[in-house]
Image: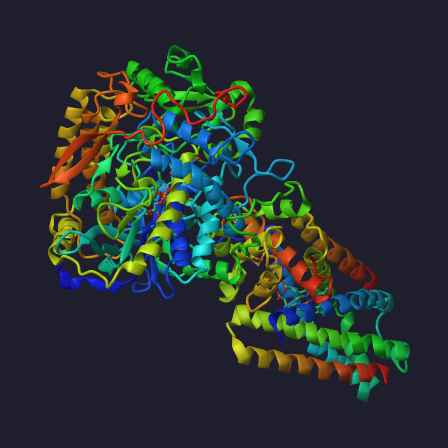
Amino acid sequence: MFSTKDIDRHDTDILILGTGGAGMFAALHAMQSAPEGTKVTIAVKGLIGKCGCTRMVQGGYNVALGGGDSVERHFMDTIEGGKWLPNQDMAWRLCEQAVVRIRELENEIGCFFDRNADGSLHQKAFAGQTADRTVHKGDLTGIEIINRLMEQVLSRPVEKLQEHRAIGLIPTKDGSALAGVLMIDMRTGRFRFVRAKTVLMATGGGPTMYKYHTPSGDKTMDGLAMALRVGLPLRDMEMVQFHPTGLLAGDHTRMTGTVLEEGLRGAGGQLVNHAGQRFMFDYDGKGERATRDVVSRGIYSEMRKNNNPDQEGVFISMSHLGPDFVREKFKGMVKRCADSGFDLAAGKVEVVPTAHYFMGGVVVDVDTRTAMEGLYVAGEDAGGAHGSNRLGGNGVANSTVYGGIAGDVMGADIRSMGALRDPDEDVMAAELARASHPLTRKPELVLPLRKQLQEAMWDEVGVMRTEAGLKRGLGRIAEISDALGDVGVAADNLGFNLTWHDWLNLRSLCDISEVITKAALARENSRGAHYREDFPDPGAMEDSYFTVARQVDGAVEVGREDVQFTIVRPGETVLPEGEPETLVAAQ
Amino acid sequence: MKVARAHPLWLAYLLHRLSGLGLALFLPLHFWVLSYALNDAAKLDAFLTLTEIPLVKLAEFGLVFLLAVHLFGGLRLLALEWLPWSAPQKTWAAAAVAGSFLVSTTFLLQAI
Amino acid sequence: MPERDHLTVTVQRGGPDAPMRPQTFEVPAYDNQTVLDVVSWIQQNADPTLTYRFACRVGMCGSCAMMVNGVPRWTCRTHVSKVLDGNAIEVGPLRNLPVIKDLAADMDPFFDKWVAAEGMHHPTRTRDDAIEAIDPVAMERQEANAGIECINCSVCYSACDTVAGNPDYLGPAALQRAWTLYNDAKDADRDAILDAVSGKGGCHSCHSMGSCTTYCPNELDPLSAIAGLKRATAKRFFGGRKG
Amino acid sequence: MSEFHLYMAQRLSALVMAPFVIVHIGVMIYAIQGGLSASEILGRTQGSAFWFAFYGMFVIAVSIHAAIGLRTILGEWAGLRGGARDAVAAVIGLGLLALGAQAVWAVTA
Ligand SMILES: Cc1cc2nc3c(=O)[nH]c(=O)nc-3n(C[C@H](O)[C@H](O)[C@H](O)COP(=O)(O)OP(=O)(O)OC[C@H]3O[C@@H](n4cnc5c(N)ncnc54)[C@H](O)[C@@H]3O)c2cc1C
Ligand code: HEM
Ligand code: SF4
Ligand code: F3S
Ligand code: FES
């Protein structure tokens, strides 16, 4: 129904997809490093700075700023937290550059983070950290970071393509380099192809294919699905981090899945099951204060024991701490719950583990380069820095550090690049056909299929996995994916047509769900966020491998590669001798 | 689509604007009447006897009310804008209205 | 259990090409239901062409603001029971902004004005310098903190009748940001800020009508921030400029 | 004149008027006792340099103040913009000034 002649053509020099911490830092750095006159364009699925997850960061930003803490210590925590799977060079660069980036955020971008009485930055310790390291602005750190970044970007001469959704990476005819990106101008419903010498993909992953999930609604794995289609390798794709306490309010409300903050458990919040009993001590000596993955599995196990269909989750109860205390200490959270009809301070609130962050992503080097010339990936879309688990506070550090690096590198690389590359028109036509496919089918509701996928992923590829379940999951995903091919969207009104985009979202989610499931099958041990009931042991750390998935001839294949211990080997440390194990008083 | 906006400060704004507008419309009339004095004090007197009529009295009351309400409302705004505090605005708005009522009622009582 | 099983929801439809017109839907009622859920239900089940905007679902991104029964609100954080008028709700796009389609407003003018008000940090230091020590309880800092959690949702901008009457007016959120920066010890260019808010449509256009402060879902107080700017500009006029 | 200067002019003229208005209302309350008469008014004011200055400044301030105020209202409620609005406001201001001057002259000369 559409031909490539219907595509608006557009040129730029540097194109950035997404405006989270990664995308915006890339734009700012690209403008600093690129030669005079370079055109920088930002294309984003929502409004600049108002979509994505960086804005939703609550807890804060990990950075070693001395006072006993060191880059080495931050690095060791990151490696141990990731259960020795991280790419060590990436993890090191993350920890090292976070120090520069936080100064940039404060001094150049204008963020103001919480201070101690003496005027220095206040830092606290998230679970899994051996020093008070997390810089924050109350529990609304992301708002401060993204608002300030947004102002800087908006006040500079960047070309802005808002509500432009990337749908396909279009390589050159020989496939060796990227020519540009095909998008939909969502407001008009028209296709637009943007050529660029370098493209940063910073679309932020987002495991929203689970029944319960925390990320913002615009994140649907589009970037990883695009990368998969052009044949790029994706690593650690089985690693989905669940946050233990997502709000459970029924499947008719978008509130379901949103995070109830970690601090509630830290402050003494209790988890009780359907029988009204506390259970976390049955699973871990630290009870509710255990790490995210442990608590998530505890809750998941309790949920399985209960077969009362009216009550799915467990409850978090704060009232024993005194409603006034809770109201005072967790003002924002209590208000949020109250706005949506729950009494967190005096009552109890039903919770479930909720898919929160995606550790997997495109294989990149420490300079954010990919295997395809002209394509760079940073932020949650890139794999490697976190291994099997992301420490609280390392997510936003990762996106801002590597976004900035991507900007620097693109600005430098562009100097040696000649003309814009010409796209492979066949790939373009295929991507166009793919995106307009539903417009040729009989209109039906998209929502039921999305719900089915979310159920399937939660049931079979969720907090605890087995081979049988994963295989069932593959079958269910394939069925849903096929069914989606028959669901149409009315083509007469494509301007800002959310239902068309729901369809495209589900397409990306189905594609990546399959990869997650296959990677989960390939990992026959339990590490970090990935737990196999049939292989509960972590395996020998020295023999650590990571999974690499790629699409070959239309089929997803998953292989394993050995982790290179380029900086530190399991059992060793880069901390100087005699350093205490932890600097945090009581954890 | 209707727009909800009837909160105290907005009403105070509207009152201030309408009173200012009212005064501005009345002012030329006021000047014109006074100018009568230039040619003929008797004419002015004739006009002033009108003020004995209850309806005119009421209008006068309204005028003084407008002036008072605008004065106090204006002082409230000046205080808000230029003094280094921003006390609870609603109280000030209310106080301004109350003050004007007080003054205008005094005036009315005196006039009768 | 909900008392009623359906809500009557009137949605304003249209855009630049089609004049706005109301359309009414019957939407199933649930216990836990926000206005965003209601709007989503219509798009997902009744009319797939309905356009609206949201992202975070929890009151952090400020994308989902709409007029609900005449009041601008974050729809993701507004429980239906709070706004129900009898059994009905009327939802429309934010006021004072161009409509792109249905419930999605064009927020560009809002952000253009944010920038026009010099709503961005003017650095004194670089990434190579240490982070400045700042007394967290200093008066100035408290003043800056007061407005810092604004999520630029444009609710205040939609509530303000000065914006409605004066297209040049920068509006409460942009001006509040300017005031925050003016009080930020780290900001290098306070004069630029005062210049930016003293021009056409600047802080002096505000009539202190306070709809911004009344309706800000974040409980911020742009009214007082704008008064602060007026005070600072007047002070500068009389020669008492501050450091 | 920039918006800011108009603002300052309006606020300063308001400040000037505030005591005048209070005195004015006070005088009225006092004067109205027993009814108003021209001779009473003129007796008080005629030939008085004080009342001349008092009402003179009042008139100047109110002309400035009201003209700027009406200019704002014309913009916001009547949709008048640019030069047209400024011109109308100027005419209003000068008109008020002329009428006011005449009145002051009448009662104090
Ligand atoms: C509730 C919550 C709390 C969190 N708290 C913390 C914390 O305390 N500390 C921490 O370190 N991390 C935290 N994280 C994780 C952190 O938010 C992420 O790691 C980080 O923000 C990711 O940044 P990003 O730039 O990669 O992606 P994002 O900020 O998610 O941005 C992605 C961007 O890509 C755009 N996009 C998506 N698809 C497309 C497309 N097809 N075309 C064009 N644009 C597209 C999106 O609209 C968005 O603008 C939290 C996450 C959530 C959800
Ligand atoms: C007594 C002293 C007075 C004070 C303290 C005062 C104060 C003010 C102030 C502060 C404003 C600005 C309101 C705003 O911009 O929101 C204003 C507006 C106005 N004033 Fe006065 N004023 C006084 C007398 C008068 C008089 C006597 C008149 C009429 C002739 C008048 C007419 C107006 C008008 C028309 C406006 C515009 C209203 C608006 O913009 O909403 N004022 N006044
Ligand atoms: S001040 Fe409040 S209402 Fe206005 S944009 Fe900021 S958060 Fe929204
Ligand atoms: S509502 Fe508008 S007029 Fe001023 S006080 Fe707020 S900006
Ligand atoms: S969806 Fe983000 S504030 Fe409502």
Please state which of residues C237 and A414 is positioned toward the viewer in this rendering.
A414
Q: Please name the residue shown 58% across and 81% down the image.
A: D87
Q: Residue furthest left?
A: A553
Please state which of residues A584 and C31 is positioned toward the viewer in this rendering.
A584
Give x and y (percent) for residue A535: 23, 17
Is A32 on the left or on the right of C124, as rendered? left
In the displayed structure, A293 sits above or below D56; it is above
Q: Please name the residue shown 14% across and 43% down the image.
A: A487
Whether residue B2 appears in this view of the structure is no
Q: Residue furthest bottom?
A: B39
The image quadrant of residue A325 is top right
Is B34 on the left or on the right of A523, as rendered? right
Give x and y (percent) for residue A46: 34, 51
Locate the N terminus of chain C and report the quarter of the image it occupies: top left
Q: Residue furthest top?
A: A282
Give x and y (percent) for residue A27: 38, 54
Is B35 on the left or on the right of C100, as rendered? right
Q: Please name the residue shown 17% across and 49% down the image.
A: A489
Q: Please name the residue shown 49% across and 60% down the image.
A: C115
The image quadrant of residue D15 is bottom right
Is A147 on the left or on the right of B25, as rendered? left
Q: How many marks?
A: 0
Please state which of residues B42 and A548 is positioned toward the viewer in this rendering.
A548
Please state which of residues A513 and C71 is positioned toward the viewer in this rendering.
A513
Whether residue A18 appears in this view of the structure is yes
Give x and y (percent) for residue A484: 15, 41
Locate the C terminus of chain C and report the quarter of the image it occupies: bottom right
In the displayed structure, B33 sits above or below C129; it is below
The image quadrant of residue B27 is bottom right
